[in-house]
Image (cartoon, rainbow, N blue to C red):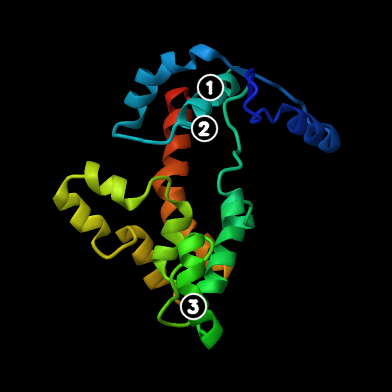
């Protein structure tokens, strides 16, 4: 699926190259400017509120794929299993700074560095392992101060009272034997895949009779 604008997100050339190397049959379709017209149908297919705008891209891709085949194998989960997201590198940078033990020079410099670049130099963790709040800070799109103003108070207390969302805290609690970049990957496998990526593709594909 390609894009006609200049957003820099058109990956057709890369896809063509991969198809050429692998010797596969290659098809392309374009995301048109009026794709938002399918939003009502896509929303109904989800069956509940769904906030990932890439649903529209998945919708068009599945619609086009169904004109060619009945069954497809998607690449969903590849970034999580093979650490393809740049966020994983950011997680490593932040967690290496945050995790203990903390020498004297780090404790002395921490307040100044955190004031200058709060995300690059997060608060120091109390123990030797980074916190779920640190990972939440890597993946969240809006600050908690904004979300707190728009969420109902009782829902905010249930989800964010302890800092990170409950689902991320639960993943960290059950994956204590996993460390480093694998900890972030495990959290995505526990939370992001079943909560976003897999339901998105399931809704988009089933709406077009695509397995």
Q: Is residue 103 visible?
A: no
**Structural crowding at the residue carrying mark 1, measured as other residues with C-alpha within 10 Å and reported as few (<14), some (14–19) or many (≥20):** many
Left or right, residue 43 beside residue 107? left
* Left or right of 48 in this view: 22: right
Quadrant in the rendering for residue 190: bottom left
Q: Residues within 10 Å of mark 3 (few under 14, many from 20)?
A: few
- Reading the chain from its start, which is encountered first: label 2 or label 1? 1
Q: Vertically, is 47 above or below 175?
A: above
Determine whether 118 is above or below 179 in the image: above
- The percent position of residue 176, horizontal first and vertical second, equals 44, 76
List the single residue furthest toward the left.
154
At numbered mark 1, what does the secondary structure look like: helix, strand or loop?
helix
Res. 176 mark: none
In 3D space, how far apart are the residues under numbered discs 2 and 1 (Cα atoms)? 15 Å
Q: Quick one: label 1 or label 3, which is nearer the N terminus? A: 1
Disc ID at residue 60: 1
Residue at 42% from the left image edge and 24% from the top image edge: 207
Image quadrant where one finds the N terminus = top right
Disc 3 and disc 2 in contact, CB within 8 angstroms: no
Which percent across, then down, holds residue 103? 54, 87
Residue assigned mark 2: 211
Rendered residue at 48%/82% (across/down): 128
Q: Position of residue 89 (x, y in %)?
A: 62, 59
Report whether 116 appears left or right of 157.
right
Nearest the viewer among 195 and 33 is 33
Quick one: 144 or 36, which is closer to the camera? Answer: 144
Q: Which mark's residue is nearer the viewer, 2 or 1? A: 1
Asked whether 130 or 117 is in front, the reply is 117
Q: Residue at x 48, y 56 (%)?
A: 138
């Amino acid at each position: 699926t390609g894009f006609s604008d200049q957003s820099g997100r058109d990956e057709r050339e890369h896809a063509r190259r991969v198809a050429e190397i692998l010797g596969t049959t290659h098809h392309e379709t374009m995301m048109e400017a009026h794709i938002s017209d399918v939003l009502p149908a896509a929303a109904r297919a989800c069956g509940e509120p769904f906030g990932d705008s890439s649903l529209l891209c998945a919708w068009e891709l599945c619609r086009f794929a169904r004109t060619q085949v009945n069954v497809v194998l998607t690449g969903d989960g590849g970034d999580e299993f093979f650490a393809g997201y740049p966020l994983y590198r950011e997680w490593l940078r932040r967690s290496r700074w945050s995790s203990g033990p903390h020498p004297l020079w780090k404790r002395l410099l921490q307040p100044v560095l955190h004031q200058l670049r709060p995300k690059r130099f997060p608060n120091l963790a109390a123990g030797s392992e980074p916190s779920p709040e640190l990972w939440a800070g890597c993946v969240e799109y809006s600050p908690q101060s904004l979300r707190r103003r728009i969420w109902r108070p009782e829902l905010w207390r249930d989800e964010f009272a302890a800092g990170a969302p409950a689902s991320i805290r639960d993943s960290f609690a059950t994956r204590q034997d996993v460390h480093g970049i694998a900890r972030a990957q495990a959290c995505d496998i526990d939370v992001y895949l079943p909560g976003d990526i897999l339901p998105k593709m399931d809704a988009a594909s089933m709406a077009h009779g695509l397995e």
